[in-house]
Each structure stands twice: as C-alpha cells, then as structure tokens.
C-alpha cells in the first residue's frame, strides 16, 4: 500500500514539473497568459462523443490561434495539438495512467504538448501559436479508445 502511494505521489510531482515546463515553452499557452490583442484568429471546435468538428484546420506559420472547445458529448474529452510521434507518446502515457488509477485526471499540457481537458457541457480555451515552418500536425483526444474511435483531425501549417 505504501509503495502504491509513493509511486502515485512521484507521478504527480513529475507531471506537475512537466506541466510547468510546457507552459513556459513557445506555442504552449492558455488564454490567461495571452491577451486577445495577441490572438490572430479564434476557431470554435465542437468535441462530441468520438468526433471533432471541424475535422481539418489550416494555420499560417507563426499565427496565434485561440481555440474555443465545447464538449457537447456525454463523457470527458481532451484537445491536444502535436505531431504524430508526440500524439502517440501522449496516447501511451494516457493508457498507462488509466491502467494505474482507473481514470483520466490529467490537465493542460502535462507532457509538453498544447492540451486541455474538457468535461461534458464545458467550454475551454486553448491559445496556440503555429510553428515557424511548414508542418503537418494533428489535434486529438488521447483518452484511451477515443483516438482509435476517430477523435482526431489535421492541422496543416503553411
């Protein structure tokens, strides 16, 4: 029992440290740290149960976008932006977390990616700046089983 609590505590401390580092990185932020004057565009995203609308997003290099994500579904979702390998790593981490404690309890940016968790009926904002080079990225919900059910979309940066 002691060992389980120790491991859980160490995991929480590690994730907190990673979250703090991710918010200090360029391109990872939230609406509290960026003024509306710094936002180039706002995109409304709907997260239903196992889908996003829109399915594809285009961004210009260096563009700062405020995403307003509304969860119209009946279960918790997340909205995470990153490249294919970062998304895969995040999915693996989410799977390990769900196996360890039976649920998803992460919040914004826990592993260095721009991310927000949205409860059913909730709307959250995520401010993100597109990289300064052409890139193909993904936005996804990596809660176990959600990505595999089609909960992802493409972000094309030009």
Image (spheres, helix red, strand yellow):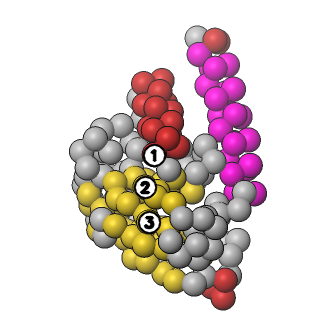
Residue 104's disc is none
Decide which of tag 3 and tag 2 comes sooner along the chain.
2
Nearer the observer: mark 3 or 2; the answer is 3
Decide which of tag 3 and tag 1 comes sooner along the chain.
1
Q: Secondary structure at mark 3?
A: strand
Which residue is most to the bottom? Answer: 37
Q: Let me know if residue 45 is in the magenta part.
A: no
Q: Let me know if residue 7 is in the magenta part.
A: yes
Cβ atoms under marks 2 and 1 closer than 8 Å: yes
Residue 98 can be seen in this image? no
Magenta segment = 4-24
x, y percent for residue 18 = 69, 42
Q: Which residue is mark 2?
A: 138
Residue 134 occupies quadrant: bottom right
Left or right? Give the position of 92 relative to 17. left
Q: Which residue is mark 3?
A: 156
Q: Residue at x 40, y 44 (%)?
A: 142
Report, in whole angstroms, how far the alpha carbon at label 3 lies from the one at label 2. Answer: 8 Å
Cβ atoms under marks 3 and 1 closer than 8 Å: no
For disc 3, the neighbor class at 10 Å (few under 14, some 14 to 19, many from 20) is some
Residue 84's disc is 1
Give the quarter of the figure containing the N terminus: top right
x, y percent for residue 63 = 58, 76
Left or right? Give the position of 18 relative to 103. right
Q: Residue at x 69, y 34 (%)?
A: 14
Residue 55 occupies quadrant: bottom left
């Amino acid at each position: 029992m002691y060992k389980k609590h120790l491991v859980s505590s160490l995991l929480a401390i590690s994730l907190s440290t990673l979250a703090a580092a991710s918010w200090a990185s360029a391109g990872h932020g939230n609406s509290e740290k960026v003024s509306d004057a710094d936002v180039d565009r706002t995109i409304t995203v709907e997260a239903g149960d196992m889908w996003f609308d829109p399915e594809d997003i285009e961004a210009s290099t260096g563009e700062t976008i405020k995403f307003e994500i509304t969860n119209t579904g009946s279960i918790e979702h997340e909205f995470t932006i990153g490249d294919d390998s970062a998304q895969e790593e995040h999915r693996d981490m989410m799977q390990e977390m769900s196996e360890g404690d039976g649920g998803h309890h992460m919040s914004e940016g826990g592993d260095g990616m721009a991310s927000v968790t949205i409860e059913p009926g909730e709307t959250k904002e995520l401010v993100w700046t597109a990289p300064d080079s052409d890139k193909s990225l993904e936005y996804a919900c990596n809660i176990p089983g959600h990505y595999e059910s089609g909960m992802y979309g493409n972000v094309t940066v030009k």
